[in-house]
Structures are given as C-alpha cells and as structure tokens.
Amino acid sequence: METMPGGEVLRLESVSKLYGSGDAAVLALDGVSLDVQPGEFVAVMGPSGSGKSTLMNILGCLDVPTQGRYLFGGEDVSTMSERELAHVRNRRIGFVFQQFHLLHSMTAWRNVELPLLYRNARDRRESAMRALEQVGLSNRVNHRPNQLSGGQQQRVAIARALVTNPDLILADEPTGNLDSASSRDVLALLREINAAGRTIVMITHEHDVAAVARRVLEMSDGHMREGALVT
C-alpha cells in the first residue's frame, strides 16, 4: 500500500453534493464530515435515499463534492485530473459491489487479474492466485462465475479488490444478493481481512450486516451521525 501522507486514509470536510438546479435541485449530502484511520472497519447505514450511494461515489472517486473537501491519503481529490482519479481508483481503492460484476466468459483468476492488466503489472497470474487463496478459493481458480455459488462469486470479487493491495476497500451492500449462510461467510471474511490490517468502508441498510464493523455511522436525509462502536 502507498504511504498515507496525512495519517488518515480519508477525510471529508463539510462535504455537500447537489444534483440539479432550481426547484429540481436535490441535496444528496449536506455538510458531511468524516475521518477514517488506517485499519478501521466502518459501516455506513441508512435507508434508501439517505445519501449512502452518493457518499460511496465520492469516497470511490467516482464523483466529486459540490462543496467541501475530500482528502484521500492527505491529497485533495478536487484538484486531481481524470487521469489521477483513475489512478486512485485502480491502484489505491478496491471495490466490492452487490452485483459482483464478474465477466462470465473468464475464469476466477482471470477476473481477479483484471485490475492488474490496466497497470501492466508483472506476475499477474501469481498475484491473482495469492488473492484467491486469501479468500479461500484456491480450488476454484479455473471455474467461471456460472460454476460458482453466489457466495463464491462474491469471494472472487473480494479477491479482485485485494489484488492491487489497496489503501481502502469500499464494499457496497456486499451481501445484498446472498442467502443468509453465504452472507455470514462473506462478512466473516471481511472481518478477517480487516483484522489483517486492511481498511474497509462498507455501505449497508441492514443492522446485522453493519454489526460486523468496528464503527457504525448512520445517514439520514444527507446527514451523518455516529452510531454504535462495536467491540
């Protein structure tokens, strides 16, 4: 992982996000401030329309604030070019989505190596194999997504997020498409990854999912407040 110049992995300073204008304007985020330190596991909870998705897009450098500042590793995201933002997304943030987003024509290890292709990394196959071993799928490396269960597909997606050795993992409703047993397995895996030192921010609307995190933040109508601290 790259060095964090400012200490924290990320910092939001009074961030607001406005979509549209005039009577049609929607204030999706309203003065949100947040610090996430290295090694934290933070869950962000809230109902649909609370601002979770907008927050996720900003944290993932997929969108920028209308007001306020977002510092990633001490660097102001708003000053970055599209090329620099793409660099951050590819090398410093690992994404895990509800829908898995795996390419069905490719085997598990080929899916995991994809982020490394964009940076012309060497030893891509070896790195992908290590990541799959880390998530307990060393015996499924040549299986395609349609040969894997939903839980196994999400493990492949987590391995893909890990393969670049990112500073931050963003997990957006990672159990949303899983049955209860697979959900428990994936959440236990995320807890293990965090215990090994990885920083995770997870978006969810489910209390039992948020409970695996060490810190819970609650969103409502674009505002954020501190929830429970889990031990």
Image (cartoon, rainbow, N blue to C red):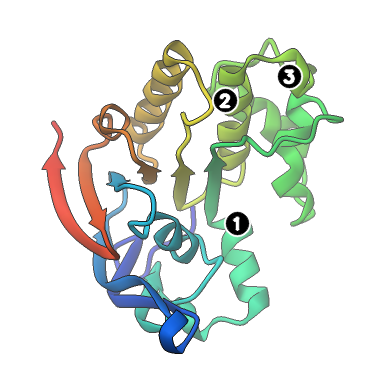
Q: CA distance from mark 3 to mark 1?
A: 23 Å
Q: CA distance from mark 3 to mark 2?
A: 11 Å
Residue 223, given in percent of the width and then of the height, sits at 23, 65
**Label 2's element?**
helix
Q: Residues within 10 Å of mark 3 (few under 14, many from 20)?
A: some
Residue at screen point 57% across, 41% down = 161
**Mark sitting on residue 91:** 1
The amino acid type, in three-letter code, at marker 3 is Val
Q: Residues within 10 Å of mark 2 (few under 14, many from 20)?
A: many
Residue at screen point 41% across, 30% down = 190
Residue underneath mark 2: 155
* 3 or 1: tag closer to the N-terminus: 1
- In the picture provided, is 226 more to the left or to the right than 187? left
Which-is-in-front pick, marks 3 and 2? 2
Q: Quadrant of the C terminus?
A: top left
Residue underneath mark 3: 141
* 2 or 1: tag closer to the N-terminus: 1
The amino acid type, in three-letter code, at marker 1 is Arg
* 3 or 2: tag closer to the N-terminus: 3
Q: Is residue 135 above or below residue 122?
A: above
Q: Is residue 21 above or below residue 142?
A: below
Q: Residue at the far bottom: name it.
A: 22
Residue 69, given in percent of the width and then of the height, sits at 35, 80
Residue 167, given in percent of the width and then of the height, sits at 45, 53
The amino acid type, in three-letter code, at marker 2 is Arg
**Mark sitting on residue 146:** none
Q: Residue at the far right: name it.
A: 105
**Label 1's element?**
helix
